[in-house]
Amino acid sequence: MLFWRAQIGLISPGTGPNMENDFHRYIPEGVGINTTRIPFSGMPSPEGLMDMVDCLEDTAKIFRGSPHECVMFGCTSGSLIGGPGFDKTCIETIERASGCPGMTTSSALVEAFHALGVNHAAVITPYPDNTNEVEKQFLEANGVHVTNIKGMTYPEDDIAEIQPSLVYRQLKQLDKTGADCLFISCTGLNVLDLIRLAEEDYHVPVLTSNQVTLWGALRHSGVGTKISELGKLFTI
């Protein structure tokens, strides 16, 4: 039995392998990951994200009848695109459809800010401005002041193909004035390996979507494993 400690269900947007890869790199011994895909056009516009969320209930049904400590909707913008409180609506949908405890990336993100005791965030994303504005409203409604939020420019057609070095260069250029935390938003990005580097360079906690998704899934499954490679969040 591979999941004698906990079993986690992961709902991943249907583009790119980065979130599954990140989970399987760092999943602790005795924890099983059961993944499925939710249809997604790959366009992180409010319209494209809402179209994806319309499929959440049918997608979560795959976990019904199998015990999971947590079923996680692993998408930052998709789980907050309806504005403040939308993450809770997504959780209710997951729980109704799966019969298991639900969680979302944006809910885990808010919990991560609170666990770290930080509440002034500079944010970088691969999203358009209208999606960034909703993310800012969501965070501020949950007690996190957004000092700056900026969409990246990138040549790739697929977010999953954005190079970590490009993300880091644009993070370096981000105005961090007044921020006590940095957040790199989007579960499609390949940026886990940037966390420790950025914390060393900027001397504040660094959060990424896949980091907080894994942390939230583990903590809500009763798994307290600490993973120093994943930054300050995973040391508490």
Image: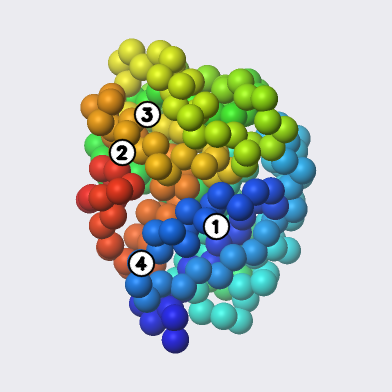
Per the rendering, the mark at residue 182 is 3
The type of residue carrying mark 3 is Leu
As helix, strand or loop, the secondary structure at mark 1 comes to helix
Residue of label 1: 20
Mark 2 residue type: Arg
Mark earlier in primary sequence (3, 2): 3
Query: Few, some or many C-alpha atoms within 10 Å of disc 3 (few <14, some 14-19, many ≥20)?
Result: many
Q: CA distance from mark 2 to mark 1?
A: 20 Å
Q: Is residue 3 above or below residue 103?
A: below
- As measured in the structure, the alpha-carbon distance from the residue carrying label 2 to the one carrying label 4 is 19 Å
Q: Can residue 1 be seen in the rendering of this structure?
A: yes
Judged from the image, the secondary structure of the residue bearing numbered disc 2 is: helix
Q: Amino acid at mark 4?
A: Pro
Mark 1 or mark 3, whichever is nearer to me: 1
Q: Residue at x 65, y 48 (%)?
A: 16
Q: Quadrant of the N terminus?
A: bottom left
Q: Which mark is residue 28?
A: 4
What residue is disc 2 on? 196
Colour option used: rainbow
Task: List the single residue furthest toward the bottom.
Answer: 1
Give the x, y percent position of residue 185. Answer: 50, 35
Percent of width and height locating residue 79: 58, 45
